Image (tube, rainbow, N blue to C red):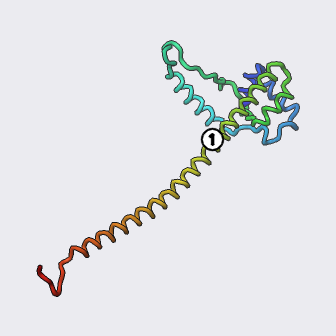
Amino acid sequence: MLDFDLALLYEVETRVLNQAVKRNIKRFPDDFMFQLTLAEFENVKFQTEAINQGASQIVIKDQPNLKSQFVTSSWGGTRKLPYAFTEQGVAMLSGVVNSDKAINMNIAIMRAFVDVRKILLKQGNINEQLTEIKERIGEHDIQLNELYDAMENLIDEKIAQIKWNDRERIGFKIKE
């Protein structure tokens, strides 16, 4: 999550959030917080704007006057590139930004991270099940091919037997 989004959720200024982080910088190693590059920030802005343009076209069913809404941060006025916080960084913020709103919002964010992780684990389990099904189908294909080959061999033998029985006889013939 980006610093200005977290500041918005915690109902503090981005400047205040970043000052609190800088005063406690030892709590935020690189795997907890990092600053976006200009290219990364431009990419985030582009993706957010694309989502917002699509959102303006979405109309909620049975309520044509209501359109979906996305909360967006204003891009104007940013002099420094934003900081991005990982799940652990967001957890660490609860000890740095000390307000009731920040603590409650932090709890909600952490619960959201847990829910996302659960969804990803379920998806991983589904992927494993699909892989297992594919392997089983592959084994069944092999078995079915063996059955088809055996059936073709039996049919070929049967045809050969019929041809043998229906052949024109040669040699000494007895008339009855």
Q: Position of residue 11 (x, y in %)?
A: 76, 19
As drawn, 140 above or below 12? below
Residue at figure coordinates x 79%, y 36% from the top left: 88
Which residue type carries mark 1?
A: Gln
Residue 156, relative to residue 91: is it above or below? below
Residue 16 in the image, given as x and y percentages of width and height: 81, 24
Residue to which mark 1 is pinned: 123
- Does residue 145 appear left or right of residue 77 in this picture? left
Q: Is residue 148 above or below residue 8?
A: below
Image check: 171 left or right of 33? left
Where is residue 176? Give x, y as percent: 11, 79
- Residue located 83% across and 19% down the image: 100
Residue 29 at x, y = what percent?
Answer: 82, 41
Q: Nearer the viewer, residue 174 or 115?
A: 174
User: Along the horizontal axis of the image, is 172 left or right of 16?
Assistant: left
Residue 56 is left or right of residue 170, and the answer is right
Q: Nearer the viewer, residue 90 or 156?
A: 156
* Camera-side residue of 35 and 135: 135
* Element marked by disc 1: helix
Q: Quadrant of residue 79?
A: top right
Can you tell which quarter of the image residue 9 is in?
top right
